[in-house]
Amino acid sequence: MHTLDATDARILLALDDDPQASTMALATRLGLARNTVHARLRRLEDDGPLREHSRRVDATALGRHLLAFMTLSLSQREGSAETARALAAIPEVVEVLATTGDADLLARVVAVDTADLYRITEQVLAAPGVQRASTSIALAEVLPLRMAPLLHERTG
């Protein structure tokens, strides 16, 4: 994956300010050549640092007002790839991370309500290799996921 430099960070921060800005508008605002901005954006998309637009969608806009985190303990004999495929097949499981500590995976789950979360939990527990799950419901978003402070730091 490409490491972002100060110019990349400036472009991304400008896009935070105006997500609909054209390449030309970004170039003018930042004092860069249009071709430079275009090439940088293309590289950011192709190399992976710039994630897909759907990651920006708030789950509440899709009727999923409940956010929960599930820690999953896996059987050491089952293949983790099979577990990952099964979890990926559950639309409400929006992110899964491998972790250290007592659990093997951490899953971010969105649900309509607690009854829906129960249904999703049953699906997660049915995934091959999942032995145990512990669920914590998020009560409030105190500090949302953010990258802008790190981008500002990169711009020096």
Image (tube, rainbow, N blue to C red):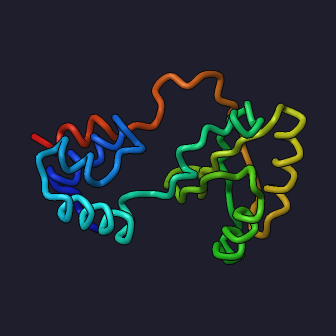
Q: In this figure, what is the number of numbered marks?
A: 0
Q: Residue at x 58, y 50 (%)?
A: 102
In front of the other: 107 or 101 = 107
Q: Position of residue 32 (x, y in %)?
A: 13, 53
Look at the picture and state if 119 lies above or below 97.
above
Quadrant of res 148: top left
Query: In the rendered image of this protein, does residue 143 appear above or below residue 57?
Result: above
The x and y percentages for residue 134 are: 72, 43
The reply, left or right, for residue 106 in relation to residue 133 is: left
Residue sitting nearer the eye, 102 or 6: 6
Q: Quadrant of the N terminus?
A: bottom left
Q: Is residue 1 above or below residue 106?
A: below
Q: What percent of the width, then of the height, locates residue 49?
A: 36, 60
Q: Which residue lies at the image location 65% right of the left edge and 51% below the top edge? A: 94
Query: Which corner quadrant holds the C terminus?
Result: top left
* Residue 117, position as x, y percentages in the image: 82, 40
Left or right relative to 88: residue 27: left
Please report the residue visible at 77 percent of the width from the left and 39 percent of the height from the top: 111
